[in-house]
Amino acid sequence: MNRNRFIYLTDLLLVPVFVLSFYTGVELHIAGEGTDHEVWHNWAVFHTIVSLLFMVLGIVHVKSHWGWYKGLKMIGCKGKRKVVLLLSVLFLLAVVSGLSLILFVDGVNSAMGLWHYRIGIFVSVFGVLHVLKRKRILYKGVRMHVLGKGKGRK
């Protein structure tokens, strides 16, 4: 598999995993308000698994676009670059707070869990904007790498 296809497929996989991470996070938050600990626990397990996958794909995504980050030194952080950089910082905060919850916090309704939830909402908003801004590129990639259409193929 060539590098461009790998990058594209990673980016494409991020979309449904992102949606699942958001959905399970909201369900986990709602379950935390309830009285059935088993329901909360099940959502916590599902959210943890999906979010660890999202973290791995997110790290691969950032690493594959590392040249863009290095270019910020020379180009500067203007316009949409600020939004992408903010998304990157929020993603890092979500990862650190999520890993802290896994490693150091036991149970429901912790202060750290509430902060993680709030950070997750911001990551989700900026993540949706990030994807929508690139929807044409994603669609073009689906045609080329999934459907085999493009670059002279019909």
Image (cartoon, grey):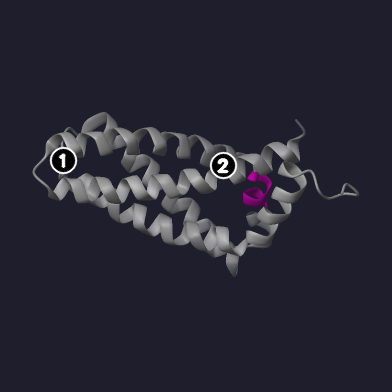
Magenta stretch, residue numbers: 65-71
Residue in the picture at 49% in, 60% down: 128
Among all residues in the image, which is located at the extreme right?
Answer: 152
Residue at which label 1 appears: 108
Residue in the picture at 42% in, 56% down: 124
Query: Left of 16 or right of it: where is 37?
Result: left
| Image x and y of residue 79, in percent | 59, 70
Residue in the picture at 81% in, 48% down: 149
Mark 1 is on which residue type?
A: Val
Residue at which label 2 appears: 13
**Based on the displayed image, in which of its 4 quarters is residue 9 positioned?**
top right
First in residue order: circle 2 vs circle 1: 2
Between disc 2 and disc 1, the foreground one is: 2
Among all residues in the image, which is located at the extreme left?
Answer: 35
Q: Are marks 2 and 1 in contact (CB under 8 Å)?
A: no
Q: Is residue 99 visible?
A: no
Q: Is residue 18 visible?
A: yes
Q: Secondary structure at mark 1?
A: loop
